[in-house]
Amino acid sequence: MSVNKVILLGRLGQDPELKYTPGGSAVCNFSLATTEAWTDKQGQKQEKTEWHRVVVWGKLAELCNQYLAKGRQAFLEGRLQTRSWDDKDGNKKYTTEILASTVQFIGGASAGAGAGADRGNSQVDTSYAQAAPTPEYQISSDTSFAADDIPF
């Protein structure tokens, strides 16, 4: 048994970017910042921000593009996914991102900052959306692997 689940609450670092695949599927990308604050041994307040790449598919992608904007808070659940590709020089590149399955839009449009903040609906304080499973990301029930197939 294994679990691949991510739960994040943070603020968007940029306006969402919506694109469509040649097959017509909507895909939305945005960055989400989560910040941890603590007091160190010397009594100084410290802060660390982590940036997360988020990918959303289907109708949920269109809703994220419609209601989210730079600076707006979002609560999301999903799973980690790592992709690889070859750059123009033939070097293998990797990225790890969150494939979101649910997104909750926190606060109204005024909660966002920046030029895109008016994209949200100020009549709605919170919105909740869940992605329908897409065929590209179905979890396989194939258990025909051996212990030697596990990379650790």
Image (tube, rainbow, N blue to C red):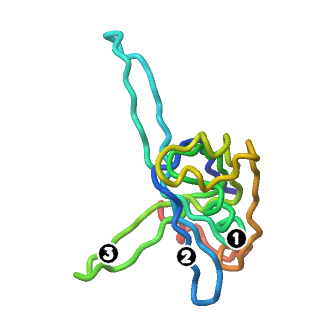
Gap in Å between the C-alphas at discs 1 and 3?
25 Å
Q: Which residue is mark 2?
A: 19
Indicate the amino acid at tag 2: Lys
- Mark nearest the camera among 3 and 2 is 2
- How many marks the image carries: the answer is 3
Give whichever of discs 3 and 2 has the lower sequence position. 2
Against 52, is 65 above or below? below
Gap in Å between the C-alphas at discs 2 and 1?
24 Å
Give whichever of discs 2 and 1 has the lower sequence position. 2
Residue 29 is labelled as none
Q: How busy is the neighbourhood of tag 1: few (under 14 within 10 Å), some, or many (20 plus)?
A: few
Q: Nearer the viewer, residue 45 or 2?
A: 45
Task: State the residue at coordinates (47%, 71%).
Answer: 83
Gap in Å between the C-alphas at discs 3 and 2?
24 Å
State the image coordinates of residue 46 (x, y, percent, origin top left).
37, 23
Quadrant of res 38: top left
Quadrant of res 98: bottom right
Residue 139 is labelled as 1
Q: Which residue is mark 3?
A: 92
Task: State the residue at coordinates (50%, 60%).
Answer: 97
Indicate the amino acid at tag 3: Lys
State the image coordinates of residue 123 (x, y, percent, origin top left).
76, 46
Would you say 104 lies left or right of 65 here?
Answer: right
Q: Nearer the viewer, residue 1 or 134?
A: 134
